[in-house]
Image (cartoon, coloured by chain):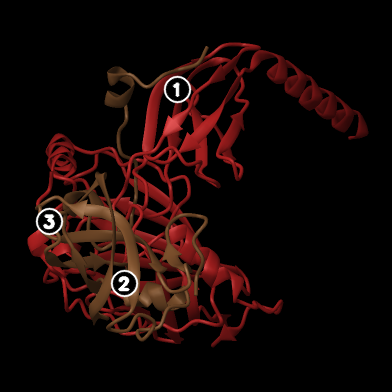
Amino acid sequence: MRQFATVAALLIVGTALFAQGAGGTLTGIVTGPTGTPVADAPIQAKNRQSGAVVRAATSADGRYRLAPTPAGAYDISITMPCCAYQPFVQQNVAIGAGQTRQLDVRLAEGASFNTAGDDPGELAAALRKRQKVPSRPVPRLAGKPDFSGVWLANEDRYPEQPALLPWAAKALQERLGNNLKDAPHTQCLPQGIPTPASIGPFMAKLVQTPALLVVLFEDTGGFRQVFMDGRPHPSDPDPSWIGHSIGKWDGDMLVVDTIGYNEQSWIGIYPHSEMLHITERIRRPDFGHLDIRMTLDDPGAFSTPWHQTLNWELLPAEEVVAYVCENNKAQHLVGR
Amino acid sequence: MRLRFTAAALAAVIYTAAPGYAHHSFAAEFDGDKPIKLAGTVTKVEWTQPHAWIYIDAVDESGKPVNWGWELGSPTSLVRLGWTRSLLKVGTSVTFEGSRARDGSNTANARSVTLNATGQKLLGASSQAQTP
């Protein structure tokens, strides 16, 4: 056994040394559209052959360093949290063995670029600063973890891209072509799914009972119900903005299954069909966090299921408030 | 080798998943390439969702008085950053900086607000801004 362990350790060290020698380095600076450095930008390099991923975050002066192994062709991407900057992808960047290559990125303005009070990073930082999250065991309710509380509904920092069918890819191009001016939220309709998804950073209040989980959020509609009383989905649900959700426990993990979406909602900027089926696997690994693994399956819009991993943070000092879209001034929305 | 952005590189820029987006697309309404800085006196405050709006009386190039509307973030967000709805009262002298609307109206997106009496910058998306 010990012999095996020694051999295994040598193999690991050997592989690491070999890999280190065979990789290259990518460095650069990430700035916004006006040239100011962007801090804490999540940047990743994905190997085009193996799919292996290397990740880093930019420092306060916008600089990053990625050292992927082995040398080869990589897709470089940055997806900033909603909504100040547009996501960035540059495909097929060759990184040679032992070489250092520079790739500077200038992010384009996003949906809320520079709007006073709408910077999601600034807001999330302000929220985190005033929270005091106690270190205590996860509360339980009827033998299961209790998810009740107000949460900062963080997005996936390294989101997967959906594999869009041709019609969906065309619809996306049209949306981008007019600066997203027809997004449902611009008409005071619900922001979209997954719910909650509202003005970033998003907040959600979960209220759990043994047979029902209620999600309250600050957007048009404002609530969602997850039925945990054993009822099935309706056989022919009326399509709605939030769908029909049922939940079942798998040990300490709640598995929420949602169907019955209408086609009007956008998933961020992406289209979907009424065949959309979302599965959320929710765990509370400690008092202060929810871990949500989401699979979005839609044979009417995506060629393969789409996955996201969300990490929500408890906000004991916050409360959700009413949100009524009352003063929209959509007449100024001209597109380009 | 230092990579420079070329048309080809820009063409390779595609969108990745972004589940959430703010109320509207900034770029569909405002033009980041049309910066504007304007001093004036507050005439009206609309403390409303999805955006707070603050109107000021200013003067145009010919000296004629003009009323301008400035869009800020949602009151929900502004409150969490330390604002209150009575922070800017009618009659307060302020200077706004931001981006003009694409439709040519006297409307702009506010990036920052400065109190002219004290020089205090109230709030903005830029890192040097201070919350009140």
Which quarter of the figure has residue A285?
bottom right
- Decide: few, some or many residues near mark 3? Use Cα within 10 Å; few <14, some 14-19, many ≥20: few
For disc 2, the marked residue is B74
Q: Which chain is brown?
A: B
- Amino acid type indicated by mark 3: Ser
Q: Residue furthest front?
A: B63
Q: Amino acid at mark 1?
A: Arg
Label 1 element class? loop
Quarter of the picture containing the C terminus of chain A is: top left
| C-alpha span from label 1 to label 2 | 41 Å
- Residues A285 and A321: in front is A321
User: Rounded to the nearest whole Å, what is the CA distance between mark 3 and mark 2?
Assistant: 34 Å
The residue labelled by disc 1 is A48
Q: Amino acid at mark 2?
A: Ser
Residue A147's label in the rendered image is none
Q: In the rendered structure, find residue B62 and report the number of the disc placed on it.
A: 3
- Give the colour chain A carries in the figure: red
- Disc nearest the viewer among 1 and 3: 3
Is the residue B38 above or below the residue B117 in the image? above
Label 3 residue SS: loop
Vertical side of A229 occupied by A68: above or below: above
Q: x, y percentage for residue B79?
A: 41, 79
Classify residue B48 as left or right of residue A53. left
- Real-space CA distance between mark 1 and mark 3, rounded to the nearest whole angstrom: 59 Å
**Label 3 and label 2 in one chain:** yes
Give the residue drawn at x 12%, y 56%.
Answer: B62
Please determine whether, in this image, residue A171 is positioned above or below residue B82: above
Query: What residue is drawn where x is 37% and y is 39%?
Result: A33
Output the chain of dot 1: A
Q: Is the residue marked by circle 2 packed among few (<14), some (14-19), or many (20+) residues within 10 Å?
A: many
- Tell which circle, 3 or 2, labels the residue nearer the N-terminal end: 3
x and y percentages locating residue A189 in the rendered image: 16, 69
